[in-house]
């Protein structure tokens, strides 16, 4: 059984990521055709959009939890944690030297297809299209989703991964929901500054993964990450 602190981490990560979302997804959220829906459906439409997004995050969490389970059973979790943690720290350093997060070339075709689909749905606003737009948005390449996916992988189970990503997604909803209501007050420069928070969040997650991989047994951090992987593997085997 995963400790409560593991899921608290998901909520904190999601809350921090919401500021990054304002920078990266702000234009998309502001372009949602909420105003074109009947007045009685506008509030519901926003919730349905975010519900679709969280649903996709949960699907990602299930996939990553299964992968994490296999890594745990193979006994590679500590090595994997060290390698992934070092990779995130190197990524942070690179963003400080060059530019903030850009879409990796391998994901650009996916980004183009999803973006085209979202644009098509924006032109035909219904409650159903709000749901599918939310699900499509969840598949858009996003650095913070990648970071959250490492947490889902550390759960070592499909259920833990789904729960981690669900809480991560829910924690991003309040800020993005508020942006939909007062978006005109958030200018592009403020969204850009919020986007830069992602780099520092990546650094923190990278350090936590390195500490876990070193098996230093530091209270809360080390025990949380260790329990989230090996503890689940033992439980599932019983």
Image: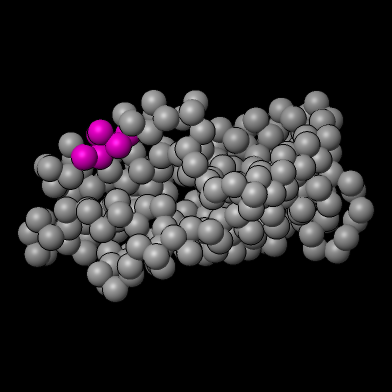
Q: How is the image coloured?
A: one colour
* Quarter of image, res 10: bottom right
The question of residue 21 being in magenta is answered with no
Is residue 159 in sight in this rendering? Answer: no
Which is more toward the observer, 196 or 7?
A: 196
**Residue at point 59%, 47% (across, down):** 98
* Residue, far right: 216
Against 19, residue 155 (above or below) is: above
Query: Please, is residue 141 above or below residue 211 in the view?
Result: above
Q: Position of residue 65 (x, y in %)?
A: 62, 37
| Extreme-front residue of the structure | 97
Can you give x and y, in whole percent of width and height, for residue 149 in the image? 59, 43
Image quarter for residue 217?
bottom right
- What residue is rendered at 63% in x and 63% in y? 8
Residue 23, percent from left and from top: 42, 58
On the rendered image, what quadrant is the C terminus found in?
A: top right
**Residue 115 magenta-drawn?**
yes
- Identify the residue shown where x is 49% and y is 26%: 106
Q: Main secondary structure of the magenta part?
A: helix
Percent x, y of residue 128: 20, 44
Q: Residue at x 77, y 42 (%)?
A: 86
Look at the picture and state if 222 lies above or below 185: above
Front residue of this view, candidates 88 and 196: 196
Q: Which residues are magenta?
A: 114-119
Count of number-bearing discs: 0
Q: Nearer the viewer, residue 194 or 149?
A: 194
User: Does the rendering let one see residue 119?
Assistant: yes
Residue 4 quadrant: bottom right
């Amino acid at each position: 059984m995963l400790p409560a602190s593991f899921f608290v981490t998901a909520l904190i990560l999601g809350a921090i990521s919401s500021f990054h979302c304002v920078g990266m997804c702000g234009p998309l959220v502001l372009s949602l055709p909420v105003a074109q829906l009947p007045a009685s459906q506008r509030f519901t439409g926003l919730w349905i959009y975010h519900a679709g997004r969280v649903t996709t995050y949960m699907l990602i969490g299930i996939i990553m939890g299964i992968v994490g389970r296999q890594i745990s059973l193979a006994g590679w979790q500590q090595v994997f944690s060290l390698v992934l943690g070092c990779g995130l720290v190197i990524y942070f350093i690179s963003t400080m030297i060059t530019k903030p997060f850009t879409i990796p070339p391998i994901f650009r075709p996916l980004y183009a297809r999803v973006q085209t689909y979202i644009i098509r749905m924006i032109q035909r606003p219904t409650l159903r299209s709000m749901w599918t737009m939310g699900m499509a948005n969840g598949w858009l390449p996003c650095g913070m989703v990648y970071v959250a996916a490492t947490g889902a992988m550390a759960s070592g189970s499909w259920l833990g991964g789904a729960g981690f990503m669900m809480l991560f997604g829910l924690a991003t909803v309040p800020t993005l929901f508020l942006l939909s209501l007062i978006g005109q007050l958030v200018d592009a420069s403020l969204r850009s500054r919020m986007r830069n928070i992602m780099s520092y969040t990546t650094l923190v997650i990278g350090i936590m993964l390195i500490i876990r991989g070193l098996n230093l047994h530091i209270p809360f951090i080390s025990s949380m990450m260790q329990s989230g992987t090996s503890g689940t593997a033992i439980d599932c085997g019983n």
